[in-house]
Each structure stands twice: as C-alpha cells, then as structure tokens.
Amino acid sequence: MIRTMTIALLAFGLTACVTPRERAERNRPLAANPSAVIAAELAFNRLAQEKGLVASFRETAHKDAVMFVPQRVSAQEWLRTGDLGSGISWTPHAVYTSCDGSAGATTGGWTGPGGSHGYFTTVWLRERSGGFKWILDHGVPLTGAKREAPEFIEGRQAQCGSRPPVTIETGGEGDDLAVGLAADQTMSWRSLVRADGSRTITIRLWDGTAMVPVIEDVVAAPATRTPAGR
C-alpha cells in the first residue's frame, strides 16, 4: 500500500511539473511529418561530423534500437565497445511515413574514406516530445556505382482512413526474424537475419488494400566481418 501511494504521489508530482504547452505538445494528435523525419536524419549525420559515429549513433538511438554486425545486436549495448570507423557522411534520398506519423523510414547513400561508399536504411520512431529516435539501422557497402542523390528527396505516406490487419510471420530454422509496426499499423519493418550473416530488411506501407514494399534491402553474407555503421 505504501509503495502504491508513493508511486501515485510521484506521478502527481511529475504531472504538476508539466507546463500547459508541454501537455498540449504531448497530447496533440499524431500526424505524418516527413520533414521531421528528414530533419532527424540530417541531424544524425551532422552529429556524426561533430562528435564521431559512435557518439551520434548512441545519442540518437531508441533504447530498444537494433543494428547488425552482421548478426542482430542491441545498439545501446554494442555501441559501448563497438567501433564504427570514422570519416563517414550520408544523405537521405527517400522518406516513408505511417499515416499517423508515429514511424518513418529513410534510405540513402553514404561515402567514406578512400572512396568507399554504400547505402543505408533507418527506421525512426516518434517520441512523446515530438522528436524521433532510430529503432533499426543498417549500412551496406557497395563495390559498384554509387547511389546518387536525387534532385528532390522522395516522400511517401501510408494511406489513411483504414487500418490493415496484423499478420503473424515466421522465419525458417536458424533465422532471426523481427517485425515492427507503427502505432496505427500502416507501416511495418521486417528484418530477417540468417545464420550465415545475410539479411533482408523490408519496409512496407499500407495503400488502402495491402501492405506494399517500398524498401527491400537484400544483403549477402559478408566475406569478412564488417562495421555495423554506414
């Protein structure tokens, strides 16, 4: 009983400290805001240039964020000792958002030292404050042509007005499969990691009748261990 009362009083105290403006910000209806997702991605890159990759990844990561090394790992745990290299910069080429704006995904190209380059995909979750933290991230090196930045960043939003059913997915023996959903279920992200380190990342948006893939990154098993970052 004492513990229950203490928690209740603490909750009351925290509520009392919230200003009317902050309360309105937290309670406002969610809505898609692709520009905010792009802004989060650009700030992520800017932080990497100022503080380094590891610091930028840690400061912008959701508490449950995952990355691939190549197996799936908890980002917050791995980044305590992991090395992502340095001198990497990236630019988003496209952004996709759920109808309610609770989740978004960016994909684009990165460049690194010695002419190295590749692409990335990041999934972002909106917090109660209105800001975004990434929940899933992976970068893939390319040996061929770069993914050139388009003149304008492509944007697409899931269809509003209806909600898709939730389907149960299973992987094969030895597979590590995880599926995430936006709060309104109109965007999903699926990550499948196989025992050999190969993986497939798929982002889907609701078009009113079906969940349609808008990103599908198919990554071969690495010949050698590669950094998890861009």
Image: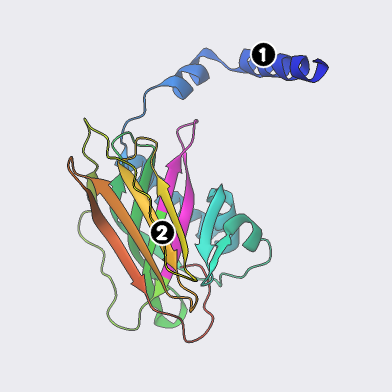
- Please name the residue that numbered disc 2 is placed on: 170
Of residues 205 and 59, the one nearer the viewer is 205
Question: What is the span of residues highlighted in magenta in the rendered image?
Answer: 123-139
Kind of residue indicated by mark 2: Thr
Q: Nearer the viewer, mark 2 or mark 1?
A: 2
Residue at x 45% of width, y 20% of height: 27
Say whether residue 127 is magenta.
Answer: yes
Side of 58 where 91 appears, left or right: left
Secondary structure of residue under mark 2: loop
Q: Residue at the spot x=39%, y=36% of the render?
A: 183
Label 2 and label 1: CA atoms lie apart by 43 Å
Q: Residue at x 52, y 54 (%)?
A: 47
Inspect this view and state whether residue 186 appears. yes
Q: Quadrant of residue 119?
A: bottom left
From the top left corner, tell me how far across and down residue 162 is, in percent: 23, 32
Residue type at mark 1: give it: Phe
In the rendered structure, are the residues bearing label 2 and label 1 in contact, judged by CB atoms less than 8 Å apart? no
Q: Give the mark count.
A: 2
Q: Is residue 107 above or below residue 115?
A: above
Q: Does 14 appear above or below 122? A: above
Q: From the image, which quarter does the C terminus lie in?
A: bottom left
Query: According to the image, label 1 marks what residue?
Result: 12
**Above or below: residue 179 compared with residue 19:** below
Residue 212 in the figure: left or right of residue 79: left
Identity of the residue furthest to the bottom in this view = 223
Residue ID at (44%, 74%): 112
Q: Where is residue 135 drawn, in percent x and y?
A: 48, 50
Decide whether residue 1 is among the magenta residues: no
Residue 122: where, in percent of width, then height?
41, 56
